[in-house]
Amino acid sequence: MKREFQQKFHYLGRLVIIPIVAGVIAAAIVAIFIVLLDRVIAATPHLIPRAPFVLPTLGALLVGALILRWIPGAGGEGIPAYINAVNRENGRMSLAATVLKFPATILTLGFHGSGGIVGPLGHMGAGASSFLVSRLCRSLKLHIEDNVRIAAICGLSGAISSIFPSPLGGGLFAAEILRKDSMRYSDLFPSIVAGGAAFVTSTMVLNQNPVFGINAPVAFLTDHMLLWFPIVAIVSGAFGVLFIISFEKVARGLCKITTGQPTRALIGGVLVSVVFLLKGDWALNTSMPLYGHIVGGDVSPIAPPVFLGKGVIAFFVLIMVVKILATSCTVGSGMSGGFTGPLLILGIASGAFMSSLAGVATGTPASYGFMACALSAVLGAAMNIPIAAIVITTDLFGLSYIAPAIIGGILSFLLYKSRTVYVYATTSWFTDNIRTNNP
């Protein structure tokens, strides 16, 4: 009888208690982080008002010298550390890297390095949850390994579900990213519970609005548009693969710098400063204004006059190229920034590009259909998470856009699944050279 009770308590903890605790922790971390990041982004231009283009270099020097030189694991994208921890270390993550990931990301993005917040916040949520649960299990003399692993998965799910209006998508992301061709129900069920707990905590308790949102009209898709979507999926998925190639090339090049940190971060910061100097500041930090302009169908406030009118098609290409290169230089140098946000911008810019080629008017259901298909395609191709990509895209755009989301996510995954932006999570060249000081 006692053993049966212990088993029931164990399953209850894995399926309910740990997911809820992890979801609440992740939601709190996300809320605090977003407030601080917004304040830093608003304050940094006043530090060097006459030469704001120097900010990425200054941020890189601070991150490299104060954090990455001592705890290199605090840098990078964040999700690879989670994948390694769950698949190889039973969920155990470095406490120092988890704690210092917070200031490393604030300094990187607040000083206009290019990257997203999903990967770093996912790392923080997973690391904090696994640490707390491991301590709790030791105190209560409970089994540690499986519980800590589940806590890490739930922490990542909670962070993503607090950022996107998609608790189911966050749960799927955390489980699907671990394996390219399969998911475990034992991972998925608690992950979804954690996503729900984080979403409720974020929206109802903390009164936080989702970071990403799209107010798309209800779609009435015609047969003509459905014929376009496979083309959109193929082209947009190719842009996702271009992101992977760019990052690998830049990171491998920076690996050849044998002096370690902070030199690598400093060089990455200088390259991003060049982008800033060339009037590409609209593509730096989290690029939320850029995201808003593309989704709203009006890029005229940020586009140079030469790119207005018919030239807007070329501007969408420029957006994708600059965002890919700036993010590759930032994260490839070891600084802390995510891939999901840049890939989100890459997806909607690709959709806007394809809809402009097709002659579709901006702001129409058809234009949003192109963006939904392209976003799902980019995530499916670059991250190999087709199901999560479909769910997140549908939650962002609305259920009436599920058809383009399915076409984009599935087709791009089938075509491009041989590569993933997280491939360096299971190889040594990035880990040994970028995230340590020993070349």
Image (spheres, grey):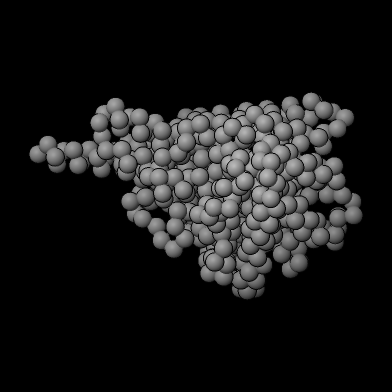
Q: Residue furthest right?
A: 306
- Residue 326: x and y in percent read 73, 48
Q: Residue furthest left?
A: 1
> As rendered, which of 231 and 383 lies closer to the eye?
383
Quarter of the rendering occupied by the N terminus:
top left
Compared to 163, does 299 lie above or below?
below
- Could you tell me which residue is drawn at 36 percent across and 55 percent down? 184
- Residue 392: x and y in percent read 53, 52
> As rendered, which of 261 and 391 lies closer to the eye?
261
Question: Which picture quadrant has residue 70?
Answer: top right
- Could you tell me which residue is drawn at 51 percent across and 41 percent down? 122
Q: Can residue 219 be seen? A: no
Question: Which picture quadrant has residue 152?
Answer: top left
Total labels: the figure holds: 0
- Residue 384: x and y in percent read 52, 60
Q: Can residue 82 be seen? A: yes
Q: Is residue 413 left or right of residue 276?
A: left
- Residue 199: x and y in percent read 47, 39
- Could you tell me which residue is drawn at 75 percent across and 29 percent down? 44
> As rendered, which of 243 and 395 lies closer to the eye?
243
Compared to 267, does 231 lie above or below?
below
Compared to 293, does 200 lie above or below?
above
- Could you tell me which residue is drawn at 30 percent across and 32 percent down? 137
